[in-house]
Every structure is written in structure tokens, then in C-alpha cells.
Image (cartoon, rainbow, N blue to C red):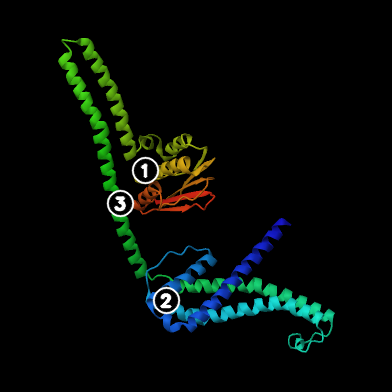
Amino acid sequence: MLGVLGAARARRLKTWRSGRYLLGTLVVATVTLAAAPLLCIPSLAQPWAEQHRRRAGVLLGQPVEPRPRAARRNLAWLVTQVVTGLPAGALALLCLGNLFLTPVITALWWAFPTAPWLPVFSVGITSWGTALSLGLVNLVFLAALAAIALPLLARAHARCCLVVLAPSPAEQLGERVTELTRTRTDVLQAHSGELRRIERDLHDGTQARLVAIAMRLAVAGESLSDDPDAAAVLVRQAHAETEDAMTELRSVIRTIYPPVLADQGLSGALSTLATRAGVPTRIDIGPLGEIPAAVEAVAYFAVTEALANIARHSRATNASVRVTCNGAQLCAEIADNGTGGADAARGSGLDGMRRRAAALDGTMKISSPPGGPTVITVELPCV
């Protein structure tokens, strides 16, 4: 019973969305026809076409990425919008209008059976029983027609608009070249920054400690014959400094390529990482197969950064990590039940994740509405 009610509700919602889309299309087509001379200007046609392109994408549930300016396609869409949008919207208006007017006319006939203007709308109605039965038949017929025809008509129109406005292969190639150029610049900047960070860590940390060790050992060597006890103290201090220097050096090495990846692979490394996360973390790793080392490193650092952000900022009580690989693409999904609001534009860590993924021609997507939950999806090509 609940399943039937749920299906009926979904059908009503789908019909309402389709009808709203078609009525909006009627308005858009009317405005397009009225303002055709102005909309022939490329700077005005582009945003006008993009707005309806996004509406079509929302109806079909398809993501619509911004596209380069294409004057010819925009003009073709203006013609298509008028030719198809006006009749499609008019049919939707006729169907939904009659669906709304049927109970109104039935009720008016019952209230004003002798009104001089009512026979224009109530041809064939001679009694209250006739009005009620015909009204019910009309209502059922129009509701069924709307439920069947409006979604099909709306989706057909939306697909037509997306096809007309879709970038050509040459435009897609140009956009791809632009994206690769930008990604290459980001990678070079990130690589230079990483080299500067490693140099700074080694210079300020490990190198300073090694200099201190060398000085202590030199002083110990000079004082060994005169004051063996002082020399022994210096040697012990140098030994302690050596341990600290090794710890810092291992820390620097981990930021270049974590040894745990080499020792345990990505599955083991992520499992170890989950046990050390700041919040209880459930991990689900499918069969991964052979994965390039660069892909493993980016996935590991992405999960590391995401879990660190969850512990620091999200106020989450639990998190999950799911990693799958279909042979051609590795997908890592990190989710939490925190407060949401994560934005790569405001956080250097998330932006670093995006840059690492882009360096391998991968993507990072964030879904983090206010109030949560937050889901970060990193997709990396393995081929």
C-alpha cells in the first residue's frame, strides 16, 4: 500500500514539474519571439540560452557545465525555442487549464444553473447529475492525459534544447585544450610550491639539527682527552639530536610518498589511516587490482586531508570512506554527518585535493549543504 502511494505521489510530482517546465517554456518562447531583434545580439543571446539550458538540465537530472560562446548555436536555439516551445507550452496550458476549470465549472453550474454566461462553458449539461458525472469523467481524463503526456513532452523538449546548444566537437576540443593548459599551470605551480616546502623543511629542520650534531661532536672530540665526562654528555646529546633529525626526516619523506603505501598498499594504508582518524570512521574498500603509484598517492593524500578536515571543522560524530575501482577509474568517496558548508574556494586543503586530482586528469566534487551531510568524491583515471 505504501509503495502504491509513494508511486502515485512521485507521478504527481513528476507531472507538476513537467507542467511547470512547459509553462515556463511558453513564457520563454513568447519573450524570445517578442525580443528576437535584441536576442540576436551575442552578448544577450548567450546568457538567455544558458539559463534555459540549465533549466533543461535540471529537468533531465543532467549536470550542465558552462560552455564557450557559440553565436550560431544560440541563434539556432532561439528559432528552436519559438518553433517547439510555443506549441508545447500551449498544449500544457490547455491541458492544465482545463484540468483546473473542470471542477470550477461543475461547481458554478450547481450554484448558478440559470446564469446567462454559463451555457457557453457547459454545453450538454442539463442537470446536476450530468454536471457531476461529466465533470468527473473530464477530470479523470485530463489528469491521465497530463500524467502521461506532459512528462514525455517536457523531456523531449529539454533534450532538444540540450542537443541544439551542445558544444560542437571543435568547441569541446578547444575547451579541453584550455582545461589541460590551466591544469598544467596548476600542476607546475603546485610542484614548485612542494619543492619549496621540502627545501624549507629540510633547511629549517633536518639541516639545522645536523649542523648542531656536527658542532657537538666536534666539541666532544676536542674535550675528550681533557674532560671525558663532558665529552660523553655531548655525545649523548648528539645521539638524541640524531634521533630527532631522523624523525623529522621520516616526516618529510612521508609527505613525498608515504612509506605505508609501499609497505601495505592503498587498502592497508587507508585502513590504518581510518583507525587514527579523529572521528569514528567506517571504511569500505572494494577490489582495487593494480593501481599506478601516483594514483595511490593522490587517493591517500585526499583521504588524509578529508579526514583531517572532518576532525577539525565538521563537528561530525562519524565518517565513512568508500573506495572502488573498475579498472579504468578509481573512485574515493569520503562522507561525514557534520555541519556541512565545506567549500574548496575557502580552504587551501580542499583546493590542494582538487589540484592533486587535476594533475592526474581527475576530478573532485563536493556536496556539502548547510547542515550536512558532506560528501567528497575524488575520481582518478587508472589508465
Residue 318 position (above or below residue 117): above
The answer to whether 300 is drawn above or below residue 170 in the figure is above
Q: Which of marks 3 and 2 is nearer the N terminus?
A: 2
Q: Mark 3 points at which residue?
A: 187
Q: In this view, does 158 lie above or below 209?
A: below
Q: What residue type is labelled 2?
A: Ala
Q: How many residues crowd around disc 2 within 10 Å: few (fewer than 14), some, or many (20 or more)?
A: many
The Cα–Cα distance between marks 1 and 3, rounded to whole angstroms, is 15 Å
Q: Mark 1 points at which residue?
A: 297
> Which one is in front, 236 or 328?
236
Amino acid beneath label 1 = Ala
Seen at 45% across and 83% down, the residue is: 36
The residue that disc 2 covers is 45
**Label 3: which secondary element:** helix
| First along the sequence among labels 1 and 3 | 3
* Residue 30 vertical position relative to residue 312 in the rendered view, above or below: below
Residue 238 in picture, x, y percent from top left:
25, 21
- Residue 289 as seen in the image, left or right of residue 145: left
Regarding residue 240, the answer to whether it shows in the image is yes
